[in-house]
Amino acid sequence: MNKIITIGRQFGSGGRDIGKLVAEKLGFAFYDRDLIALASEKSGMSHAVLSEADEKAASPWLYAAVGQSGQTGFMPTNDTLFAVQSQIILDIAKTENAVIVGRCADYILRDEPVELLNVYLYASDEARIKRVSERMGITGQQALQKMKRHDKQRKFYYDFYTDRKWASHVNYHLTLDSGKFGDEGTAEIIAAAMNLK
């Protein structure tokens, strides 16, 4: 049975960096933005177009407009990407041990015969602002605005494509304050939890 760690995360909590550290510690494959490239290959759609739709739900107004116009066979790019990425995530779970960041992977794999560890990472606004502003070379205020926008998108995306609520502790086996433990410490805890399972 393959071992899969999924990581849901607040923007700026270090999900990508920590996920990579966990994968290195355990010798697992790591998937985050490369899922977009895999989806592009599988679907034949432009990488740039899919990147724009990544972890964003289609606007409900779009569905209303499509329904009123009577079009058939239309699927928004966001829905196409979710469907293709979901199949890729299912295929990964069948073939290897992996750490998968975001993309509703915890929900997609909920009924699969894998050893699953669902993790959610958060941090204080102060810690996230520091990480985002340093990484992107922007002011604290700009970082805060970016955090709010991305978290809102992630919540809408997750709630839209699942029957769950984003960031709710009941969806995860482990929730961690990455600002409290740091990247290395957080990765150590996650790796230890996977080994305990």
Image (spheres, rainbow, N blue to C red):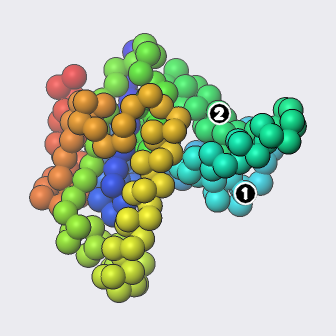
Going from N to C along the chain, the mark reached first, 1 or 2, is 1
What is the secondary structure assignment of the residue under circle 2? helix
- Quick one: which residue is furthest to the left in this view? 180
Q: Type of residue at label 2? A: Ala
The image's mark for residue 128 is none
Q: Distance between the residues labelled 1 and 2?
A: 15 Å
Residue lying at 71% horizontally and 60% vertically, measured from the top left: 48
Residue lying at 21% horizontally and 59% vertically, measured from the top left: 123
Indicate left or right for 51 with 154 as reference. Answer: right
Question: Toward which corner of the image does residue 117 lie, by quadrant?
Answer: top left
Residue 84 locus on image (x, y percent): 66, 35
Q: Mark 1 points at which residue?
A: 49
Crowd around label 1: few <14 · some 14–19 · many ≥20 (10 Å):
some
Quadrant into which the C terminus falls:
top left
Q: Type of residue at label 1? A: Val
What is the secondary structure assignment of the residue under circle 1? helix
Q: Which of 139 and 178 is in front in this view?
A: 139
Q: Which of 50 and 92 is in front in this view?
A: 50
Q: Mark 2 points at which residue?
A: 83
Question: Toward which corner of the image does residue 17 lie, by quadrant?
Answer: bottom left
Q: Nearer the viewer, residue 24 or 44?
A: 44
Q: Can residue 88 be seen in this view?
A: no
Q: Are marks 1 and 2 in contact (CB under 8 Å)?
A: no
Residue 133 locus on image (x, y percent): 34, 79
Indicate left or right for 38 with 55 as reference. Answer: right
